[in-house]
Image: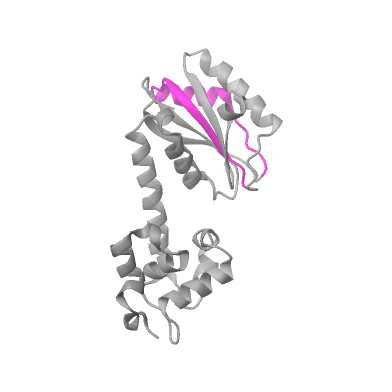
Amino acid sequence: MPITDWPSAERPREKLLARGPNSLSDSELLAIFLRTGIQGKSAVDLARELLNDFGSLRALLTCSRQDFCARKGLGNAKYAQLQAVLEMARRHLGEELKRKHALSSPADTRRYLQALMRDFEHEVFGCVMLDNKHRVITFRALFNGSISSASVYPREVVKQALADNAAAVILAHNHPSGIAEPSQSDIHITRRLVEALELVDIRVLDHFIIGDEVVCFSERGLI
């Protein structure tokens, strides 16, 4: 049965408008994005099939262009739309964080960094640059590494922080494995960066490791 023949209250678009996006399931949200189904399947049926095939909504959203476009009912146009939606979400989180003090909105900081860094296939180390009131100036991705490690040079971090006129920084890097537990090298480089930045009166406020979860050094007593 096509969605247009469903009761109005059960149609994903009408349901979203009446009850808000939080009321929709993953398949209903995906169906709104897909807009149309394929022969013999409604958009909701297609969405359910895709989620079952990929295993989760996140796996679908982060799959390669080749895997995405290989599925019937998808293609380059929908892939481009999806990437645009994801990038708008990341930019929205970044703008929200810039309007707030990073330390007064730790949940926003976590969400922003996770959206930005979780799905890199290699390790990336960056800094959130903050002014003297701990408002966000910008985020800088400074070093790229292999899937297991990144080379981080304190001198380059200091140089960039000074160029951005930062009074404080929040360090962040991802673990592509998804396991966010700090390694001894993570702890060691954090201490080196704290010492290097202290020499130019820039404080390191925290260090976040981004994986399937987000680990915060300050909460672990590591900084």
Camera-nearest residue between 31 and 159: 31
The question of residue 151 being in magenta is answered with: yes
Camera-nearest residue between 135 and 108: 108
Rendered-image quadrant of the C terminus: top right
Image quadrant where residue 131 sits: top left
Q: Which residues are magenta?
A: 148-176
The question of residue 11 being in magenta is answered with: no
Where's residue 216, x and y in %? 56, 33
Where's residue 147, x and y in %? 65, 46
Where's residue 10, x and y in %? 36, 73
Q: Residue at 57% x, 22% y: name it.
A: 193
Q: Is residue 54 visible?
A: yes
Q: How many marks?
A: 0
Where's residue 219, x and y in %? 57, 29
Image quadrant where residue 107 sits: top left
User: Eyeballing the image, is 208 above or below 49?
Assistant: above
Q: Is residue 70 visible?
A: no
Rendered-image quadrant of the N terminus: bottom left
**Is residue 5 left or right of 145 when viewed as pictured?**
left
Q: Residue at 43% x, 35% y: name it.
A: 139
Q: Residue at 61% x, 21% y: name it.
A: 192
Residue most extreme to the right: 184
Q: Residue at 52% x, 71% y: name it.
A: 50
Colouring: one colour
